Image (cartoon, rainbow, N blue to C red):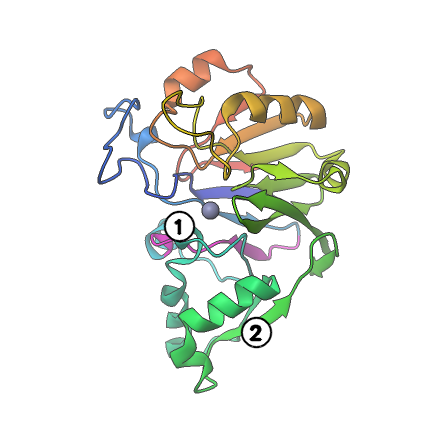
Amino acid sequence: MKIRILGCGPSNGVPSLSRGFGACDAHNPKNIRTRSSALITTNENQNILIDTGPEVRIQLLKANNPKIDALFFTHIHYDHMGGVNDLSAFLLDKHDKIPVYLTEETARYFKGQLSYLFDSNIAPFELNIIKPYEPFFVGKTKIIPIKQYHGNLISIGYRMDDFAYSTDVKSMEEMGFELLKGIKTWVLGVVSSKRDPNKPESIKHIYLDEAIKWIERISPEKAYLTHMGQKMDYETLCKTLPAYIRPVYDGFEFEA
Ligand SMILES: [Zn+2]
């Protein structure tokens, strides 16, 4: 399968309105990060979009506006769902409904966001409720949704064949780690390189040192970091991380 990182930024993007580029080199375009989402093209040539942040329209246009065969959501935060209204543009062109895979909780929020479409029965989406650990299929590709703790929310990571996408996660049950065993490529969300001693520890996101421990435990051939904040300078990460762990950038593509 082919993966394109549409965006790899944190909730407020890089540069952000309040913090600018922070510790990131403002002259490196790889440090310009829109909100996190990814496009997976399966071996059967089906396109799976994971999340619809506020820049999703621009992200998809830059990816040559692919037909979306399935949409997965990780959780309800704005930086992962805020652009979903732009997908209702499909209404105008009378495409088939887009199959959406999401948890019960996310579905409630999703319908609320688009109530003006759902109430008139014209929403161009077909909702499929998923449950953590219960596999489902897109074409012949088996998808395993993995339960993740993200502050006081549950988010969902997705394993598909030998690839997994896990963002907005602070902890997982043992079952989650078990189900990730054997993956070859892992995209993992890390907002910050280290804990700020003047602030309480994040209960929403793992730090870089925690991510490295998880990566060593699962031991994929390649791990990619996404959802990176203003402390995560691209070149600095490339120089300091082992070669099999790389930061990504918006528009980065790879095979998995
Ligand atoms: Zn989140």
Q: In this view, does 55 lie to the left or right of 178?
A: left
Q: Which residue does the image show at 54% across and 42% down from the upper left? A: 3
Name the residue at the top extreme.
Answer: 240
Query: Is residue 85 visible from the viewing direction of this image?
Result: yes
Tags 1 and 2 touching, CB below 8 Å? no
- On screen, 101 above or below 118? above
- Where on the picture, by quarter, is residue 32? top left
Picture mark count? 2
Image coordinates for residue 1, horizontal then vertical, percent:
62, 44
Circle 2 residues within 10 Å: few <14, some 14–19, many ≥20: some
Image coordinates for residue 99, horizontal then vertical, percent:
58, 68
Q: Which dot, 1 or 2, sits closer to the camera?
A: 1
Q: Is residue 54 left or right of residue 163?
A: left
Give the CA distance from mark 1 to mark 2: 22 Å
Magenta segment boundaries in residue numbering: 44-56
- Residue, disc 1: 79
Q: In this view, does 65 lie to the left or right of 164?
A: left
Residue 40 highlighted magenta (yes or no): no
Dot 1 beta carbon under 8 Å from ligand 1: yes
> Looking at the rendered structure, which numbered label has been put on residue 126?
2
Q: Which residue does the image show at 40% across and 20% down from the upper left? A: 197
Residue type at the position of mark 2:
Glu
Q: Nearer the viewer, residue 117 or 252?
A: 117
SS type, badge 1: helix
Q: Nearer the viewer, residue 54 or 30?
A: 54
Image coordinates for residue 92, horizontal then vertical, percent:
37, 78
SS type, badge 2: strand
- Where on the picture, by quarter, is residue 107? bottom right
Residue type at the position of mark 1:
Asp
- On screen, 31 above or below 69? above
